[in-house]
Image: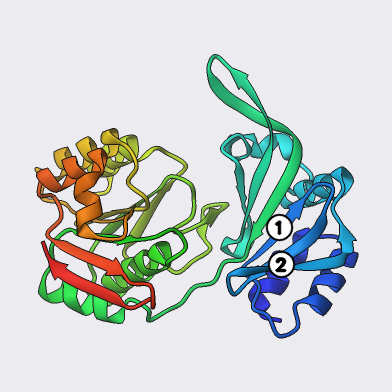
Amino acid sequence: MTEEVRQALRVCPSQVRSAVTEAARGLTPEELRFRCGTALRIFAGGRETEVPRVSVTPELLQSILSSATEHSVYAAQNTIRQGFITLAGGHRLGLCGTAVENNGEIATLRDISSINLRIAGQHPGCADAAADFLWTHPRSCLIIGVPGSGKTTLLRDLIRQISDRFLWRVSVVDERMELACCVGGNAQFQVGAHTDVLSGVCKQRGIEMLLRTMNPQWIALDEITAEADVEAMVRASYCGVRFLATAHAISREELQRRPVYRKLMQAQLFETLMTILPNRQVRTEVM
């Protein structure tokens, strides 16, 4: 079992750690799925494997949640209401339960019914070719691919490389704390010595804040999903900043079909498109 898996399992009771260690032999776990009323399942290699020795109960879910928040669930409410908790090492808990709303917004989650322990791993060097291309073509770059294809992993290593190799100033809007995964102000992933990270703020507000305060040459953000994101990026581009970003799409044609991305394409903000193919290879083209 890898060190990353052992580290992620620290939030689990000892009997769960033992059962997973035994059941995961020969596997490289990516997620542990705790669903109340069923057996624990390990997700690895595109399929789930049952761990029959571990039956998921409300008490087990509460124990994991308490450990993940260092026994201060209240202090973690800001991310719990968004459905996740970031752990040391960049691992994270995805949460499902009953949403409690206040003035039309989710205030918290109660009666947790499912936990997805996502095991993080950095892959230094996966963006070597992409970084080389940006050195010779230093223009805004959009990374696309299907969910789970590795867009965030590629983006993270690309940020690290253009920061450390090329000494470009990079600012990261880490809205859901998945790129740098800062815990207590410390990035859990390597994102470069010339990189500044703004966590837990929406992309639109984050872009505006970073422009005013950090003088970035590049701004990086994960998962463009809203028109407000696009509008903020277009405004920032007038200031000469370049962007690194990701979007869910399988091709340039699909980008054109989706209203939000169509607006992005019409703005001609991105001049480089990197598509992660089903075999995990990256196709790079000038827009």
Can you say which quadrant of the picture contains the N terminus?
bottom right
Mark linked to residue 47? none
**Residue closest to the far bottom:** 26
**Residue closest to the far top:** 103
Circle 1 packing at 10 Å, graded few (<14), some (14-19), many (20+), is many
Residue 232: % across, % down: 23, 37
Residue 243: % across, % down: 22, 54
Q: Is residue 282 visible?
A: yes
101 or 75, nearer to the observer: 101
Give, as a three-letter code, the residue at label 1: Arg
User: Is 30 located above or below residue 251 in the figure?
Assistant: below
User: Is 124 located above or below residue 37 in the figure?
Assistant: below
- Quarter-of-image position of residue 206: top left
55 or 13, nearer to the observer: 55
Task: Using the numbered discs, state the Cα–Cα distance from disc 2 to disc 1 in whole angstroms.
Answer: 6 Å
Dot 2 or dot 1: first in sequence order is 1
Circle 2 packing at 10 Å, graded few (<14), some (14-19), many (20+), is many
Mark linked to residue 42? 2
**Residue under the image location 48 percent in, 47 percent down:** 176
Q: Is residue 224 left or right of residue 108?
A: left
- Quarter-of-image position of residue 124: bottom left
Give, as a three-letter code, the residue at label 2: Ile
72 or 105, nearer to the observer: 105
Mark linked to residue 33? 1
Residue 140: % across, % down: 17, 58
